[in-house]
Image (spheres, rainbow, N blue to C red):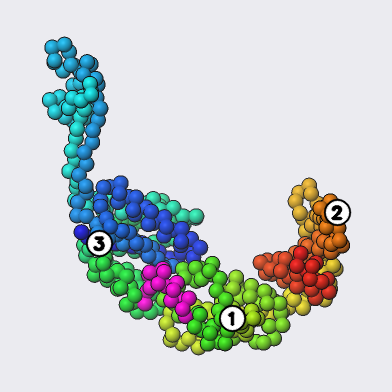
């Protein structure tokens, strides 16, 4: 039994592609090994922004032998009354590559039974790995130089090992070997992998945590600890945690601070640029109130962490200054007053603009309120319909589109519209 490693090293891949890429890679590895009749125990996949790899354990030294059975003509057609073979059975035997005398007679027919001895795994792997490489699919592919074969991002190295022996694979002038690339900023630029079995350990010793689940768990542990240290808890969005996991090879979390003046903004107006634009995790107290801290993850170790923290604070400060500007500018007039600008926002060709849409919504809401028996709330419902699209033209929503609806609620509350209208 042997261990097979196949790593493809690329330029940084989009984080949102990575889960699908690794699932596809695992399925292809398992499928191609089974189709080639090469027994194995299990396949594990690993990935970072710059590499995808699978490790197959318990790979057999040889293919499984194969026995095939092909049904031929009936005995009445295969032999004449004297028992001599006819041209029909001779043609069948010739096509199957066997002698007529080797055919088996059963159930009124002749059968060709062929036994094929399995080949050596090592000899089959170059074609198999090449097949996997060319079978991978991506949401979008790139082409580079003058190569016809495209990939998710240009690839620059490949590691293909059966235990410690290199399996030759070549594509786009890149040849496989036993040398991978190290972390961009830490350790050695090139790393020799002694054997497929030591792949994960060797990379970890060189500042690359290639195990996705281990990397995710490490990030979660670090950001939770920093949130607690800051006097609250880290608000972890699982989608953001997954994205950050695929943005780094060696994660180190850090905690930065923001000026208290930004906390005067609606909470979502701070969290959105923090989380959706900068990939930062907010810190909340036990009541859910936003604290003046953020947590992010760098791709590196703790060296010069204070400089990195300062840089992240500066970037976020610029984004929050934008939010303050847009918020204050929006508040110069009411949500009702913003509604007039909807005349300039097209709804759909032939169906008018967004202002006209809200007029239709008002009429429909009034009708439905009466017909459904909730006429007591008709006034509030119609008012909500009237204001429902007004925040589309505010500066905050124009800049941070994720806040559409949320800012409508906040501005409605500040205008004194009441909880019912604001929530609606």
Residue in the foreground of this view, choosing between 381 and 277:
381
Please give left or right for residue 365 compared with residue 11 in the image: right
User: Circle 1 sits on which residue?
Assistant: 283
Q: Is residue 105 above or below residue 383?
A: above
Q: Quadrant of residue 164?
A: bottom left
Q: Quadrant of the C terminus?
A: bottom right
User: Circle 2 sits on which residue?
Assistant: 370
Q: Is residue 273 above or below residue 65?
A: below
Residue 159 at x, y percent in the picture: 30, 63
Q: Is residue 91 visible?
A: no
Residue in the foreground of this view, choosing between 286 and 259:
286
Q: Which residues are the magenta region?
A: 207-222
First in sequence, mark 2 or 1: give its number.
Answer: 1
Residue 215 located within the stretch drawn in magenta: yes
Q: For mark 1, does the 10 Å Cα neighbourhood hold few (<14), some (14 to 19), or many (20 or more) residues?
A: many
Q: For mark 3, does the 10 Å Cα neighbourhood hold few (<14), some (14 to 19), or many (20 or more) residues?
A: many
First in sequence, mark 2 or 3: give its number.
Answer: 3
Picture residue at 63% right of the left edge, 75% below the top: 271
User: Circle 3 sits on which residue?
Assistant: 3
Residue 326 at x, y percent in the picture: 74, 75
Please give left or right for residue 122 compared with residue 295 in the image: left
Q: Is residue 334 above or below residue 304?
A: above
Question: What secondary structure is found at the residue carrying circle 1?
Answer: strand
Question: What secondary structure is found at the residue carrying circle 3?
Answer: strand
What's the CA distance linking mark 2 and mark 3? 71 Å
């Amino acid at each position: 039994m042997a261990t097979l490693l196949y790593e493809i090293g690329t330029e940084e891949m989009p984080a949102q592609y990575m889960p699908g890429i690794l699932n596809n890679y695992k399925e292809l590895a398992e499928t191609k090994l089974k189709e080639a009749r090469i027994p194995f125990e299990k396949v594990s996949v690993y990935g970072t922004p710059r590499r995808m790899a699978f490790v197959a354990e318990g790979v057999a030294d040889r293919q499984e032998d194969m026995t095939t059975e092909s049904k031929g003509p009936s005995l009445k057609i295969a032999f004449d009354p004297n028992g001599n073979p006819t041209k029909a059975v001779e043609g069948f035997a010739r096509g199957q590559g066997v002698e007529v005398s080797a055919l088996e007679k059963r159930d009124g027919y002749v059968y060709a039974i062929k036994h094929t001895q399995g080949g050596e795994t090592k000899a089959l792997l170059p074609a198999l790995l090449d097949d996997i490489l060319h079978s991978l699919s991506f949401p979008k592919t790139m082409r580079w130089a003058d190569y016809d074969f495209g990939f998710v991002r240009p690839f620059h190295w490949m590691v293909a090992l059966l235990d410690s022996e290199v399996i030759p694979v070549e594509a786009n002038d890149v040849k496989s070997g036993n040398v991978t690339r190290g972390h961009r900023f830490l350790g050695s630029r090139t790393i020799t992998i002694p054997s497929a079995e030591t792949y994960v350990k060797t990379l970890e010793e060189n500042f690359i945590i290639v195990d996705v689940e281990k990397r995710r768990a490490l990030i979660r542990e670090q950001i939770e600890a920093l949130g607690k240290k800051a006097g609250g808890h880290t608000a972890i969005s699982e989608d953001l945690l997954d994205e950050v996991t695929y943005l780094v090879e060696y994660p180190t979390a850090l905690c930065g601070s923001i000026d208290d003046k930004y906390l005067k903004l609606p909470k979502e107006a701070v969290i959105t640029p923090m989380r959706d634009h900068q990939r930062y995790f907010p810190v909340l107290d036990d009541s859910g109130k936003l604290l003046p801290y953020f947590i992010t993850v760098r791709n590196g170790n703790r060296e010069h962490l204070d400089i990195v923290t300062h840089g992240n604070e500066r970037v976020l400060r610029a984004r929050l200054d934008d939010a303050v500007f847009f918020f204050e500018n929006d508040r110069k007039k009411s949500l009702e007053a913003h509604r007039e600008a909807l005349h300039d926002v097209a709804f759909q060709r032939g169906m008018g603009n967004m202002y006209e849409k809200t007029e239709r919504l008002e009429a429909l809401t009034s009708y439905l309120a009466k017909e459904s028996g909730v006429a007591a709330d008709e006034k509030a419902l119609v008012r909500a319909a009237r204001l429902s699209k007004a925040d589309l033209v505010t500066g905050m929503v124009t800049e941070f589109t994720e806040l559409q609806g949320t800012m409508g609620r906040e501005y409605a509350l500040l205008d004194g519209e009441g909880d019912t209208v604001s929530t609606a």
